[in-house]
Structures are given as C-alpha cells and as structure tokens.
Amino acid sequence: MAIRERLSGNEAVATAMKQINPDVVAAYPITPSTEIPQYFSNFVANGSVSTEFIAVESEHSAMSACIGASAAGARVMSATSSQGLAYMFEMLYIASGMRLPLTLVVANRALSAPINIHNDHSDSMGARDSGFIQLYCENNQEAYDNTIMAIKITEKTKLPVMVCYDGFITSHSVENISLMENEEVKQFIGEYTPDEYLLDSTKNISMGPLAMQEVYFEKRIELAKAMEDAQDVIIEVSKEFEKITGRKYGLYETYQLEDADYGIVLLNSTAGTAKDVVDELRNKGIKAGLLKPRCFRPLPYNEIPEELRHLKSLAILDKSDTINAYSGPLFSEITSTLYHQNIQIPTINYIYGLGGMDVTTQDIKSVYMDLQEIAKTGKITQVRKFLFDNKEVD
Amino acid sequence: MSNNIYGRGAAILKDGTSLDVKTGSWKNRTPVHSKEKCKNCMLCVPYCPEGCIYQKDSILTNIDLDYCKGCGICAKVCPFKAIEMKDSKEEI
Amino acid sequence: MPYNIKEMVNKKARFVAGHRMCAGCGAPPAIRTILNALKEDDNAVISNATGCLEVSSFLYPYTAWKNVSYIHTAFECASATLSGAEKAYEKFRKDGKIPQDKHTKFIAIGGDGGTLDIGFQSLSGAMERNHDITYICYDNGAYMNTGTQRSSSTPLHADTTTSPAGKVLQGKSQPRKDLTQIMVNHNIPYVAQTALFGNQKDIYEKAEKAIYTHGPTFISVFSPCPRGWGYPTEDLQAIEKLAIDTCFWPVYEVENGVYKITYKPAKKLPVEEFLKTQKRFKHLFKEENKHLIEEMQEEIDRKWNYLLMMEEVTNKE
C-alpha cells in the first residue's frame, strides 16, 4: 500500500535511505545535498536506522571510506554535489575500477569557477567517464524511486551508481510523492551478500594491485562490458519495481514523441517545463515531442535513435558545456548514436540553465519555434546556441 | 569454495601469492650460513627484508636462496660472524 | 609474558617473500616485525597508501600479504579507506555476522610522503574520528618510489632530487615536519616512534601496544633506504643504531599524554657520525658547509631536550 506524502527531493532521498538502512554512510556536507546527511544523522541519532555514519573530513575521504566499507562487504551510500563530486573524482574511477557496489546521490550543482550554488549538470557530466552508472531524475518521485532501485542495480552489476537530480529545483522543492512501505523496500532490496570482500572469514584477499599493461587493459575491457550488460539489469530491476509500485521506468521516457515533428532531448527537471510546452503547442496543432533519458550511463545507444528517427528536426538541450568550442555532452553523444544508424535529422544544441538560470516555458517554446524554422528551411546557422539571448521571442 | 584466485576489479582471492616469485635471481653475492658458528640467537631473522631466513624450534635451519636478494644485512647483523657473503660467481 | 625474540620470530607470517622491495630496504623488516605483534588467531585488514611498499608487495597477481586482507585504493586516503572498512566491521559485529571470539585489527600503512604530506588530512580525520585503527608510517625521508624527491619528512639540508645540493642551494632548507608530535596533539591514546635495534623488543612491544590499544594509535618507524640515502645495503643495522645514538631519530612513546623515552644512548654521538655514512649528506662535509651541520645538531638537541623535558613533566605525580 503506497503512502501519500509531500516531501522535497532531499527529504524523499533521505527517506529512501532510511528505509534501505545501509550498513555504512560516509558523507560530507555541501549545498544543496547537505540536507541528506543532515536528515540521515537524525535517523542515526534516534535509532531509526542501524547504519554506521562516518562524518568524514572531505568528499575525497567520503568516497574513500565508502570504497573501504564496500570492499569490506558492506552496503554503502553517500551524497554530494558540485565541488564535492569533483573532489571525489579520482576515487570515483577507483570505485568502478575495483567493481565495488555503492550508491552515490548527486544533487546536481554548477562547478566553479566562479563558485555558484545553483543547479546545472556540470558536476555529474564532469564525471560521465568515471565508470559509474548514472540515473537522472526529473522530480522527487523519480529521485526516491531511483535511489531504491540503485541498491539492486549496483549490487547486481557490481558497478557503483550515481542518482542525479537537480539541486534546489528538485532537492528543495516540496512535491506530492508516493512512498513505499518499509517492508516493501526491505523485501525489494533483499539482504546484501557480497562474494569478494575483505571481511570474508573463509579467505584473506588482496584488492587494488599494481597492474601492468595487459592486465590493466583487460580489466578496463571487463568494466566496459559490465556497463554494457548493465542496461538489461536496469530494465529487469525496473520491471520488479513496477510490480510493487505500479510506476514504470525504462532507460528513458518519451512524451508525445511517437508522432511528433519536432523533438527535444534533455535531462532532469526541465522535462516538466518542456511537457507543459508540448501540451500547449499540441493544442495549437504543433506536433512537439520530448525524449528524457533516465539512464545516461550506460547510454541507450540502440533505442534512442529509433525513437527519434521520424522527427523533422531535433534540439538537444545541455545543462552543462564541454567547452570544446562545438557542443555540450548530451548533444555529442546522442547525435553520434544517430550517425551510426544513418539517421540524418537537422539537429541543434542548446546550452541552457547554467548556474541555475531560470528555464521558462518561454525558453522552451523558443526552441520549438527554431525547430519549426529549421524543419522548413533545413538550414542550421549555428550548431550550438546559448539559451540565454533568446529572451524576447513571443 | 571455488579455488579461483582471480576476482573482479583485479582483486586476488588468495594470500601470499608472491611466493611464486623467486627474487633470488637478483643477488650478485650469496650468504653462506655456518651451522657451527651459529648460536641460534635469531637476531638475523627479523632483519632480513625478504623474511627468508628460516628457523624451526629456535634452531636456524637455512637461508632460502630462492628469495635472498644478497643485500648482506644478515652477515653484518650476526654477532658471531656465522654468515659470510660470498661472490655469487663462485660455486658454493 | 616478557618479550623473547625466539618466540617473536615464530609468529605467523603476515608479509612474505617474493615482493619487489629493493635489496636491503629497511621497510619490510620493520613492517614484518610490527605485524608479528598480531595475536596468532587475529586477522587484520591492511590499508596501504600508494608507495614503495604497495607497488612492490602487490604487483598483479602476486601479493606478499599473508594471513591478512589487504586493500590499496589511492595515495592520500589509506586512513579514510580503512575508516570505512573498520565501520563495516563494527556494523557486522553488531549484526552478529561476525562471531564474538574472532577479532580483526585495522592497520593503515604509508610512507612519509603518503602520511605526512598527501595523506595528512585523511590521517588527521581518521584519528580525530576515533576509529579503532593503527596507522604505521614507514619513514624513509623522501618520495622513494618515484626516485627520492623531497617530502616534508626529508631531513634539514638533505640532498634529494627535488632539493638537490647545488652551487647556490644546499639541499632541503626546511627542518623535518615532526608528524609524531602532531599525532600526540590529536590526543589519541597511543603514539610511538621506533626503529629496528637490538633484539627488536622496542619495535615489537610498541606495535603490540598500538594494535591492541582501543581507539586510534600511530607509530612512526625509521625506514632506511639504501638507494635514496646512498649507503651500502648491508649497513641497515649500523645506520639505525647511529640514528638513535645521535638522537637524530628519538625512540619514545606517548601513552595518554605521558611521555616515555624508551632508548637513551649511553653516549650521545654528534650528528656527524650519522651524516658521514650517507651520500645524501656528503655536501655538508665541504669546508663552507660545516655550519649547516651545526644547524642540524642544534635542531636535534632542541628536539631531544624537549622530549627529555616532556618526559620529566608528564611523569610528575
């Protein structure tokens, strides 16, 4: 039986963590994810969880402690944002390279400089090659659901998982939410039984060797294959989740895309804004549609092109920039999946919302207007535009 | 209990596998232990960086030349000059 | 049970042969003797910082770690990694997943670079958080794995490849950072500085105390490096003896704030006796550098007198 509640994104994720009751949580405060270790510390102090909480002295040590605990055989979680995730950078690669299951919640926030506490995706996009599975969430419901599913996904794939949702827009905004019962969560995630761990009483093991060329490359291939296989695991875990909650999750979500002429691809909370605009344009007979990847790592490179094949024109919106003088990360990865299916749609890239700049329905509408124009003329003057100077479009 | 020692993420699921590596080939001089002079005081044993000076029931048995790198520490540590470093080229 | 070397050498091996440390390296004898302090049926998790010991003791698929579990993750987080493992253990014990009579000890090991410099923050955090761990620093006074670059633990005026003795500069210009004292000020129950000498009673008993004192403990162990210091591999024992007899490397412990100097040289030797045995100090024996040796002697005497004073003050009833 679902529990109807009204919670912010951080409260929702902290509630999920309470219901998961992991063995070890090691975390360091950073806006806007601070509330998660804060809420969680209350659960620890009041005995509503039996977790060992480690208030580490830095995010680098947060991920290192999580790695040590996971290597010892524990079920482990943490949360961070922005500079914290950047400070963990070295250890992210080591967690995945050592194939250690753990769940890291990321309340997305801009990366310095200049320092900015508001939302964009530069932090998790900065870690997109770290070997972590990356799940992106539009709202607090998805943040709650993905945090619970992440436990099963990481323990089955033996790949660490990052659950990303927008700082402040999702983390600090209260929305209606449907929670699972504690017993439902316990039953869904089950007992964690590690197979290769430091505290195995039957044998002493060694982890983290120096590997020469051949072994190193071999291990990196194994990691790449594990990420490849993760797609099926994510689908399978999501199906089990749907049986209990009725909420359906795939590797991505489409919204009025099947018969659309003009499509937008984007991540996280802006999808909500875009869906309103799609509804409004549909009422005016403009066939707009949306594709929102839930899973960016692994990239659903087979399915996404099929969903976009029929479009007359496509815009890919990046809430981060690669500073490669050409385009954002989502654009370069999605267009490359189209390329290999020989799908030639006029596609443009918008860099938007950096540093928490508001993204209004007006902004999204201006994108669909551009797409109409491009579909007509087939001409793209600029591959990448900053959704910053489009203010006056009515 | 599988005896596969190769774990995920380059873990090794068995301890002490370095014993397969015979570092003895490093040495260009070899310790020769004289049982007569040796008083089994054990002072040399902890000083050996390889831990390859063996003893049984407090009697020093041998220096394992499969691992000895010829550093010469034991010879200098021994208060009774019971260990002498010989140039490895000579046949012992 | 008074210390007896014949029993000590009979203890279960925790670090075995086949590792790739340089011939004559001072680290393995120290680490092996310290780990011998583990009780026979106790297990241990070793968390090792990147460094000489790490790359030489676990070159895939060969691990020299025996009867212990071992993890290396990165250079600056041996303590943080161990913190996580120790809390996982505590959780498993609470959940009854580990039988009460089986004990696992948590030991972090790092070189001076990995401990005094890059790993300092992670060490300080773990000690402050009161984890039940022991940190062993094998101090060879420079970044030896990468070829003798200067660390904060490099002695004053020592020549290294990044603080070379040249025409204008004469080796490292700063005195050595004294991490042992910094650890004393973390108010942890047990801190010690030791070396290999005599029948290894000092190092073994300090290791026993550190490993079996509940809470965070720290040992700094002298770890001569023939390649980096420039002395013949066979002289390990002599170098260690000179270091403690010149008080270049004081041997003492601080238990809950109470100082005890556990080795006082019968005849305190001038620092030259120690310096003259190593190439890294050769330039100090030039006529124009003699005053640098005096500076080093002053620093050594200042520290030694401080320890004598602390021993006196903290033992007053």
Image (cartoon, coloured by chain):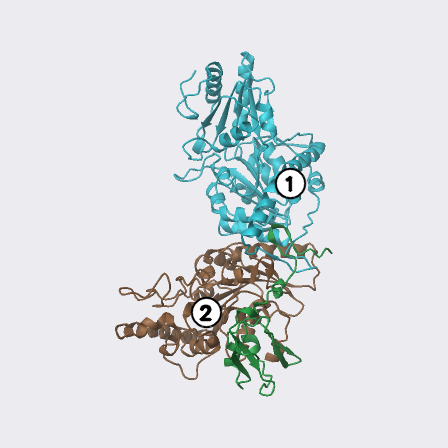
Chain colours: A cyan, B green, C brown
Query: How far from the left and from the top, in percent, is residue C205?
Result: 56, 74
Callout 2: few (<14), some (14-19), or many (20+) C-alpha neighbours within 10 Å? many
Q: What's the amino acid at mark 1?
A: Ile
The answer for which chain carries disc 1 is A
**Along the horizontal axis of the image, is A66 left or right of A323?**
right
Q: Say what secondary structure mark 2 lies in.
A: loop
**With respect to residue A281, does A61 lie above or below?**
below
Q: Which of the 4 image quarters holds residue A260? A: top right
Residue B31 position within the rendered picture, expressed as x and y whole percent measured from the top left: 55, 78
The residue closer to the viewer here, A170 or A380, is A380
Mark 1 is surrounded, within 10 Å at the Cα level, by few (under 14), some (14 to 19) or many (20 or more) other residues, namely many
Left/right placement of residue B69 relative to residue C101 reads: left
Residue contact between numbered discs 1 and 2, judged by CB atoms under 8 Å: no
Q: Nearer the viewer, residue A380 or A89?
A: A380
| Residue for badge 1 | A153
Can residue B15 be seen here?
A: yes
Give the residue at the far bottom of this rendering.
Answer: B36
Q: Is residue C4 visible?
A: no
Label 2 is placed on what type of residue? Answer: Cys
Labelled disc at residue C225: 2
Mark 1 vs mark 2, foreground winner is 2
Q: Chain of mark 2?
A: C
Quarter holding residue C232: bottom left
